[in-house]
């Protein structure tokens, strides 16, 4: 698992635009709506919890990598 740092760019799914149904009636999402944010602080107690600023709303948000399902897009230091 990646080490998270302030300045890293992350993304997570906030919604889906389209859902499809199989012949048996099972419905599943196919077109995700992604939100992007820059990490401004990583928790000292849980390194998978971060405070970030959303790029679309400029709002601060607290997310957990596993519970909220965000993923690292790029590292601040270019790695």
Image (tube, rainbow, N blue to C red):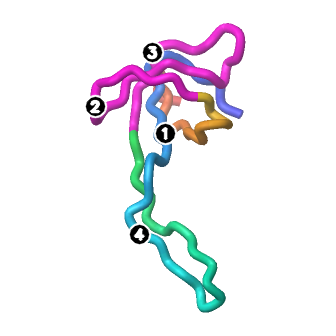
- Circles 4 and 3 in contact, beta carbons < 8 Å: no
Please name the residue that numbered disc 4 is placed on: 18
Drawn side of residue 10 relative to residue 25, left or right: left
Magenta: predominant secondary structure element?
A: strand
> Percent x, y for residue 52?
44, 22
Give the distance between the C-alpha atoms of the residues marked 4 and 3, in whole angstroms: 32 Å
| Picture residue at 55% right of the left edge, 18% below the top | 5
Give the distance between the C-alpha atoms of the residues marked 1 and 2, in whole angstroms: 18 Å
Q: Secondary structure at mark 3?
A: strand
Drawn side of residue 76 relative to residue 69, left or right: left
Looking at the image, is mark 1 or mark 2 earlier in the sequence?
2
Q: Nearer the viewer, mark 4 or mark 3?
A: 4
Number of other residues with Cα within 10 Å of mark 3, as a class: few under 14, some 14 to 19, many 20 or more: some
Residue 62 magenta-highlighted:
yes
Above/below status of 30 relative to 72: below
Number of other residues with Cα within 10 Å of mark 2, as a class: few under 14, some 14 to 19, many 20 or more: few
Drawn side of residue 9 relative to residue 25, left or right: left
| Picture residue at 51% right of the left edge, 23% below the top | 62
Mark carried by residue 73: 1
Looking at the image, is mark 1 or mark 4 earlier in the sequence?
4
| Picture residue at 41% right of the left edge, 25% below the top | 38
Looking at the image, is mark 4 or mark 2 earlier in the sequence?
4
Please name the residue that numbered disc 3 is placed on: 40
Q: Nearer the viewer, mark 1 or mark 4?
A: 4
């Amino acid at each position: 698992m990646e080490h998270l740092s302030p300045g890293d760019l992350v993304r997570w799914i906030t919604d889906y635009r389209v859902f499809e149904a199989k012949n048996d009636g099972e419905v599943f999402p196919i077109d995700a709506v992604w939100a992007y944010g820059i990490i401004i602080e990583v928790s000292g107690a849980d390194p998978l919890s971060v405070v970030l600023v959303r790029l679309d709303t400029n709002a601060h948000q607290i997310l957990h990598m596993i519970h909220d399902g965000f993923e690292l897009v790029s590292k601040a230091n270019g790695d």
